[in-house]
Image (spheres, rainbow, N blue to C red):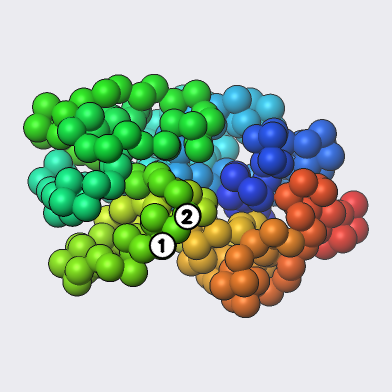
Amino acid sequence: MIKMIALDLDNTLLNSAKEISDENVSTLQKLHKKGIAVVLCTGRPINAVWPYVKQLGLTEENDYTITFNGGMVIRNHDQKVLNQKGLTLDDFSLIHQYALDNDLPLDILDFEKVYELTDLVKSTYKEVLNSPLEFVPKDFKELEDKPYSKAIMSEQIATLDNARANFPAEITDHYKIVRSQPKIMEFLPLNMSKAYGLNILLKHLEMDFSNLMAFGDAENDYEMIEAANVGVAMGNASDEIKAIATDVTIDHDDDGVAVFLHKYFNE
């Protein structure tokens, strides 16, 4: 029995204008009122998705959000952290040196803001993400030694394709590397995924993956789509995601989430 709906944001629940359509809002709110947990699963911090949380009305005692691609599970109404896992500053030395040697950009995120590394070529992350995150220009050597969530490499698609194809083993063995969008590549702790965060939340709410329906479109959604009892790929999803999904809905610009939910729950 489905008791939780997990939703990626970009190119899944959000349309191309970075908005949740009225149809998606009303459909999810109806299911939420019937007792089904609705959980946003994103690479962003909670403050960057808070307008969407409020728009959907996900502010009750047992409403949670999965942020940083599984790295943080947070209760919405008081923003209490249920679980947090990240990286140290030293963990980023490898990818920072690679970026420096190969004229590539890098942004490093703690659990609140983005640090644009000014000792590297300029990143496009701020423009590509188009989200109300705080961006702070910093040289890598100026960063504090504290917990961080991930690193981001934002560039043209071909540039990221080429970089990934040429990463040495010391890079690929040190990070979980995923594309959250065609122009965004993320460097996460090993074994990190949205499924990791969802597993913690499901157990906390006395559920398991048999109770989960998940929607996604990109590489960073792979594990949660694969683990869910009902894993739904968007019509605009990559072929890799469609191949492991139990179902495929229509495009994110055509209310693909709501269309599938109406059909599944006979709404």
The relative height of residue 46 versus residue 246 in the rendered view (above or below) is above
Residue at horizontal 42%, vertical 37%? 125
Camera-side residue: 63 or 126?
A: 126
Q: Position of residue 50 (x, y in %)?
A: 55, 27
Q: Secondary structure at mark 1?
A: helix
Residue at horizontal 87%, vertical 60%? 263
Q: Secondary structure at mark 2?
A: helix
Q: Quadrant of the N terminus?
A: bottom right
Q: Which mark is residue 157?
A: 2
Label 2, residues with CA under 10 Å away: few <14, some 14-19, many ≥20: some
* Mark 1–mark 2 distance (CA, rounded to whole Å): 6 Å
The relative height of residue 142 versus residue 259 in the rendered view (above or below) is above
Camera-side residue: 81 or 154?
A: 154
Residue at horizontal 53%, vertical 70%? 227
Residue that mark 1 sits on? 161
Q: Position of residue 172 (x, y in %)?
A: 25, 67
Q: Amino acid at mark 1?
A: Asp
Q: Residue 245 is drawn in which quadrant?
A: bottom right
Horizontal side of 126 relative to 213 (left or right) equals left
Q: Amino acid at mark 2?
A: Ile
Horizontal side of 219 relative to 83 (left or right) equals right
Horizontal side of 23 relative to 131 (left or right) equals right
Q: Is residue 154 visible?
A: yes
